[in-house]
Amino acid sequence: MSRFSHWQKLHHHPYCQDIPSQRSSDLFQAIDEEGRMAFFQKQGNRRMEKEYWAFDTTSISSYSEVLSQVKKGRNKEHDRLPQINLALLFGAQSGLPFYYRKLSGNITDVKTVRQLMKEFDVMGYKKVNVIFDRGFYSKDNINALYKHHQKFVIGVQLKLKYVKGVLEAERENLKLWSNFETQFTTYGVCRTINWEYEQERPYKGDVIKLEKRAYLHLFYNPEKAIKDQVDMNDYLTALHQDLKENTLKDYRMKDYDKYFEVTETPKRGKKITPKEEAMRNAVRNYGYFALLSNEVNDPFEALSLYRSKDVVEKAFGNLKERLNFRRMQVSSELSLNGKLFVEFIALIYLSYVKKKMQDAELFNQWTLQGVLDELDMIELFEAPGHGRVLGEVTTKQKELYEALGVALPSL
């Protein structure tokens, strides 16, 4: 909205005049919860059959002291301001966002999954397939996904007992040529495991315990191994520097103790000693990573799906940078709810154009901004007594409209 005053002078739009700050707040507040939920339900009906949805969260900072969900929390960009968290569901194949919700700024990723399952039920989303980053992993969350019959692919940490056991058994086999996939320059294997499912039944005062089938996918990427080593060297250097200069960061506290021993005496001063055994253990798993699924039993299909979650991370980038939503800049809950919805609609349009450009291979010659600028050059003339006249549409512009599957502009 910050550039609307300038934009509206050069473009025809339904309101036909500038929208000042107070008027935009009124418009945001007019968007009610009933309308939003109806929109989400219709959105869900448009989803592609058997499409996986990528789920992730981001943090949006705020100076506001009146918004109830603005809290101090773990900011993924290490911004020190209070924040709200924004969760987003994105179609991995369609490239389109389907659902969002705002969360209190102190809610961690791992706490959001069970609430998401409840909201699927409310909106009538059945048999949804979801992709999660490993930050959403917990035993309770996996149990909730099984309970709600949701298919999933989720990242898992190598330090988990059941993952570690299978990895040690397969470590040598994993690097065989027969397990190498050229497309991903990665080795991968899948092993069927039994998930120890538990479901509490408060009304009966007991716990159901069953074994559910799951697929554990293990991978080794030589390029990732090199990157992991470089990243770890940089990280250890940063930890050592913090300890040396006594500038400790809250989010690194566990790792200071994990990788270094600090002793201090009046005579010798501070001594920082590396814990080399811990460092050797980290080196052992450079280049390895793991995924868990209850449906996909091919390692590289699982990997392809998991990597498609990048679409959400790019969407968050579009929201914050291109759609100017790094700060909320609203003063009431109603305005925030409405502005979030408008930003979401804008993200749908932006994502649709990007997906169409990808399908038509336009990114080989164009940037997104370049396409929008080229089409923005088409002019509309209006003179008293003569009506409106559409300016010339060039051959290049016609080709862009055709490639995007959009009808040529007309009066």
Image (tube, rainbow, N blue to C red):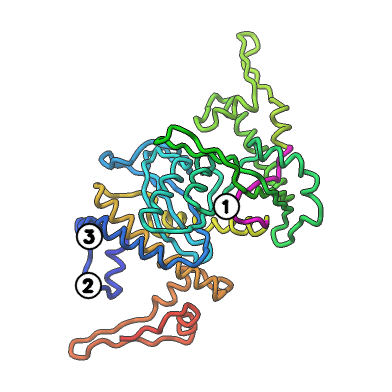
Which amino acid does the dot numbered 3 rest on?
Leu
Q: Residue furthest front?
A: 204
Picture layout, residue 148 above or below residue 269: below
Residue where numbered disc 1 is placed: 153
- The reply to whether residue 365 is visible in this rendering is yes
Nearest the eye: 256 or 243: 256
What distance separates the C-alpha of mark 2 from that of mark 1? Answer: 48 Å
Mark 3, residues whose alpha carbon is within 10 Å: few (<14), some, or many (≥20)?
Answer: some
Q: Tag 2's secondary structure?
A: loop
Residue where numbered disc 3 is placed: 27
Within the magenta stretch, is there residue 405? no
Within the magenta stretch, is there residue 294? yes
Mark 1, residues whose alpha carbon is within 10 Å: few (<14), some, or many (≥20)?
Answer: many
Mark 2, residues whose alpha carbon is within 10 Å: few (<14), some, or many (≥20)?
Answer: few
Look at 59% across and 51% down and name the residue there: 294
Q: Position of residue 355 (x, y in %)?
A: 50, 69
Picture layout, residue 268 above or below residue 97: above
Report the side of 103 relative to 22 (left or right).
right
Look at 47% across and 77% down and name the residue there: 404
Look at 28% across and 75% down and name the residue there: 12
Which amino acid does the dot numbered 1 rest on?
Val
Q: Position of residue 346 (x, y in %)?
A: 37, 63
Picture layout, residue 93 above or below residue 144: below
What distance separates the C-alpha of mark 2 from that of mark 3? Answer: 15 Å
- Reading the chain from its start, which is encountered first: label 3 or label 1? 3
Q: Tag 3's secondary structure?
A: helix
Which amino acid does the dot numbered 2 rest on?
Cys
Report the side of 406 relative to 193 (left or right).
left
Magenta-highlighted residues:
284-298
What distance separates the C-alpha of mark 3 from that of mark 1? Answer: 39 Å
